[in-house]
Image (cartoon, grey):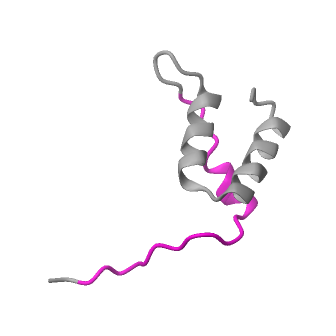
């Protein structure tokens, strides 16, 4: 059996570039791109990072 080459890391600081990777332009039927971005970020970030993401989204003109 092979060993996983990466361990999951929780917490820590997220860089501006990492936060921006969660900004999506594609929307899905019945959802806006902002909603999709927020849900993805919520599922992957700790509360402090998620708050930073919401601030970034607002700065970029996103609708929260």
- Most extreme residue toward the top, as rendered? 30
Specify start and end residues of the magenta stretch as a single range: 3-26
Seen at 76% across and 50% down, the residue is 51
Q: In which quarter of the image is residue 57?
A: top right
Residue 27, given in percent of the width and then of the height, sits at 53, 25
Seen at 70% across and 64% down, the residue is 14
In the visual, does 30 lie left or right of 46?
left
Looking at this view, is 58 or 42 the one in front?
Answer: 42
Seen at 56% across and 38% down, the residue is 39
Q: What secondary structure do most residues of the magenta stretch adopt?
A: loop
- Most extreme residue toward the right, as rendered? 59
Q: Vertically, is 49 above or below 37?
A: below
Residue 23, given in percent of the width and then of the height, sits at 64, 41
Q: In which quarter of the image is residue 45?
A: bottom right
Residue 3, given in percent of the width and then of the height, sits at 26, 84
Seen at 65% across and 30% down, the residue is 34
Magenta stretch holds residue 39: no
Residue 11, given in percent of the width and then of the height, sits at 63, 69
Task: Please give the count of numbered marks on the rendered protein.
Answer: 0
Looking at this view, is 50 or 18 the one in front?
Answer: 50
Q: Quadrant of residue 64?
A: top right
Q: Vertically, is 1 above or below 42?
A: below
Magenta stretch holds residue 21: yes
- Quarter holding the N terminus is bottom left
In the visual, does 4 lie left or right of 10?
left
In the visual, does 53 lie left or right of 5?
right
């Amino acid at each position: 059996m092979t060993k996983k080459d990466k361990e999951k890391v929780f917490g820590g600081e997220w860089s501006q570039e990492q936060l921006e990777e969660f900004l999506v332009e594609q929307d899905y039927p019945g959802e806006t791109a902002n909603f999709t971005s927020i849900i993805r970020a919520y599922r992957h970030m700790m509360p402090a990072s998620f708050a930073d993401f919401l601030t970034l989204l607002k700065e970029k003109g996103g609708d929260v």
